[in-house]
Amino acid sequence: MIAIAQRWAVGAMADIDGGAEAAPWVRMVVVHEALSAVDQVRKGSDQEMARFFLERVRREWAERTDEVARGVLAIAPLAVRMARANAVLADSNGQALNATVRDIRAELGERITPLQDALCTFAVDERFDRRRERDAA
């Protein structure tokens, strides 16, 4: 789930100046957002250290004011939400993802940013392309 959300977020960020260079950081912000979606996080020093590091990365990105940072923070939660729907109902032929994308677009309405819209489009298109490749094989 997290890898899918990361791929979609990085793919959507590709068209923003500086977005490609931010890819490693985008991935970490997405992981931070995904922590709340993970049902169980094992307790232990490694996990606590990782959580501390990711929270610090997220805080640093929240303090930035550039377009890349605003974009990352705006799409990371959406990418995680869409990837979770896709993973939970993977056998639904993409219907769960499509429904989640429709819900997100309806919730955001006119407030949807071009980057948020690009994330939704990228995720659905990428899911469709992968399914078509799998079916052709």
Image (cartoon, rainbow, N blue to C red):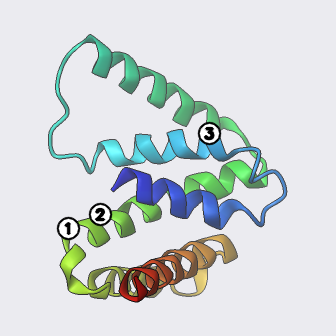
Name the residue at 61% across, 57% down.
10
In this rendering, the answer to whether 82 lies above or below 76 is below
Q: Residue furthest front?
A: 137
Measuring from the top left, give residue 128's x and y in whole percent. 45, 85
Circle 2/circle 3 CB separation < 8 Å: no
Quarter of the image with the N terminus in it = bottom left
Residue appearing at x 81%, y 51% in the figure = 18
Q: Which mark is residue 84?
A: 2
Which quadrant would the C terminus be assigned to in this image? bottom left
Q: Which residue is mark 3?
A: 25
Horizontal side of 11 relative to 91 (left or right) equals right
Q: Which residue type does callout 2 highlight? A: Arg
Tag 1–tag 2 contact (CB < 8 Å): yes
Structural crowding at the residue carrying mark 2, measured as other residues with C-alpha within 10 Å and reported as few (<14), some (14–19) or many (≥20) = many
Residue 133, compared with residue 73, is above or below; it is below
Amino acid carrying label 1: it is Val
Q: Secondary structure at mark 2?
A: helix
Percent from the top left, x then y, of residue 73? 57, 52
Mark 1 and mark 3 lie on one chain; the one further toward the N terminus is 3
Residue wearing tag 1: 88
Which mark is drawn over residue 27?
none
Q: CA distance from mark 2 to mark 3?
A: 20 Å
- Which is more toward the observer, 46 or 132? 132
Q: Secondary structure at mark 1?
A: helix
Residue 67 in percent (x, y) is at 77, 55
**Along the horizontal axis of the image, is 68 left or right of 126?**
right
